[in-house]
Amino acid sequence: MKIGLLFGSFNPVHHGHLIIASYMAYETDLDKVWLVVSPQNPFKPSNALLDEYQRLHLVRLAVEGELRIEASAIEFSLPRPSYTADTLAYLFEKYPQHQFALIMGSDGLQNLHRWKNTDWLQAHVAFYIYPRSGFPVSAADLPPQFRVVNAPLLDISASLIRRRIREGKSIRYLVPDAVAREIEIGHYYR
């Protein structure tokens, strides 16, 4: 089985994440997509993050009933901060029968050289790159293990959603209804 890994804080998960995951799961050769909730991104401050288990719960609500997309807490038991190379090494050991691919936006390419063990990553996994506004990408400019996937771009940010919640504005249509209900019930991001 070939599994695409879409790492993120998912603070909160929104339709932009889900459209990318769905497109990758149904329009590429990936069999499944795991939305990997990162407890702590080494490049982002963690003080504004909702608790990791609450974020995982929101992702599970968002993908409930979806056969080819699932939430993953794989990094919760690994050392922090979470490094993609360490997570993949763990996944290769735990699931030797699977192939793994990284799903990332074209904006992430500019920082790839800063990642831990970048050379090892590029030697061991395929990269599925989707376009992000302001970060044009061409397959001709990338090594062969990088595949550009022209997934639809829905330019929504989690920071926009958090701001709207703080301001008492609606987040309907930005997140799945079940996620919006849980955010409201839990008084998250206020």
Image (cartoon, helix red, strand yellow):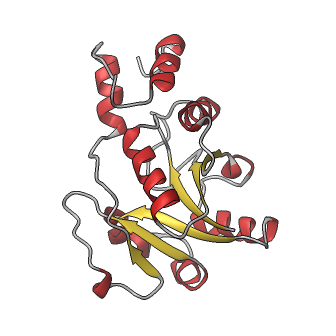
Q: Position of residue 54 (x, y in %)?
A: 60, 29
**The quadrant where residue 91 appears:** bottom right
Tally of numbered discs: 0
Q: Position of residue 129 (x, y in %)?
A: 39, 68
Identify the residue shown where x is 72% and y is 70%. Answer: 98
Q: Residue furthest left?
A: 134
Identify the residue shown where x is 30% and y is 12%. Answer: 168
**The quadrant where residue 106 appears:** bottom left
Identify the residue shown where x is 30% and y is 55%. Answer: 152
Q: Nearer the viewer, residue 139 or 42?
A: 139
Left or right of 90? Residue 115 is: left
Q: Position of residue 29 (x, y in %)?
A: 53, 70
**The quadrant where residue 189 appears:** top left
Query: Looking at the figure, which quarter contains the N terminus?
Result: bottom right
Query: Looking at the figure, which quarter contains the C terminus?
Result: top left
Q: Nearer the viewer, residue 177 or 10?
A: 177
Up/down of 47 relative to 27, above or below = above
Identify the residue shown where x is 70% and y is 51%. Answer: 74
